[in-house]
Amino acid sequence: MYSQEILQSLSSNECALKRFLTRKLGCSDTASDILQIIAEKLLLKKVKRTVENPTAYLYRSAHNEVINYIRSKQVRTQSESLYMKVYVDSQIPDISKSYIDSCDLRCLRIALDELPLLTRQIFFMYTINGIKQRDIAAQLAISLSSVEKRLTVAIKFCKEVLSQ
C-alpha cells in the first residue's frame, strides 16, 4: 500500500488536479482518464520512502502522465499515418511495377526450365507447396543433404536471374 497522506491528498485535491489536467490537455474526459491512471498507479505502488509534500508529488505525477499521454498520442498518430500511407500505396496498382513484375516472373519461369528436373521439382515442392525439406527427401527417396544442396542451387540461380 502507498502512504495514507498521498491517498488523502489525492482525495482532497481531486477537483483541482482535474482542472489542472483539463487545462493541460484541453479535454475533460481525457483529464478524468489520466486522473484514474494516477490513482491506479498510486494504489499499486509500494512504499519506498515518505513524501514530504504529497500535493506537489501528485501534481508532478499528473504532469508526467500528461507528457506520457502526449508522447503516446504522437507515436500513435505517426504509426497510423505511416500505416495509412503504406496501405493506400499498396492498394493502388502501379502499372509500371506490375509490368516489371510480370517480366521478372516470365524471365524466372524461363530460367527455371534450365534447371535439372529434380532440382526444379524440389524447388517447387519447397517454395510453392510449402513442403518441409525432410518430407521432400522422404517423398523423393533422396538424402536430406541432397535436397538442401539442390534447393541452394535453385535459390542462388533465381537470385542471379532476377539481378540481371
Image (spheres, grey):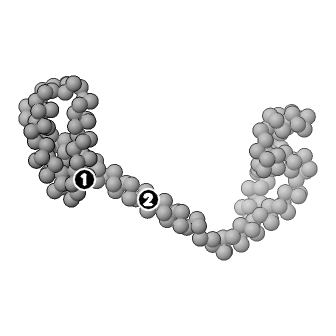
Question: How far from the left and from the top, in percent, is residue 139?
Answer: 88, 37
Q: Which residue is at a point 10% across and 30% down the rendered structure image?
A: 5
Question: How far from the left and from the top, in percent, is residue 62?
Answer: 19, 45
Q: Which residue is at a point 19% across and 47% down the rendered structure image?
A: 63
Mark 2 or 1 closer to N-term?
Answer: 1
Residue 29 shown left or right of residue 159 in the figure:
left
Q: Which residue is at a point 28% across and 53% down the rendered structure image?
A: 70
Question: How far from the left and from the top, in percent, is residue 99?
Answer: 71, 72
Question: How far from the left and from the top, in percent, is residue 123?
Answer: 82, 48
Mark 2 Cα-neighbour bin, 10 Å: few <14, some 14–19, many ≥20? few
Is residue 80 visible in the rendered image? The answer is yes
Q: Write down the residue under mark 1.
A: 29
Vertical relation: 80 (above or below) 11: below
Residue that protrudes farthest toward the bottom in the picture: 95
Check disc 2 and give the amino acid type.
Glu
Q: Write down the residue under mark 2.
A: 80
Check disc 1 and give the amino acid type.
Asp
Q: Which residue is at a point 88% across and 58% down the rendered structure image?
A: 113
Which mark is in front, 2 or 1?
1
Whole-angstrom CA distance, mark 2 to mark 1, is 22 Å
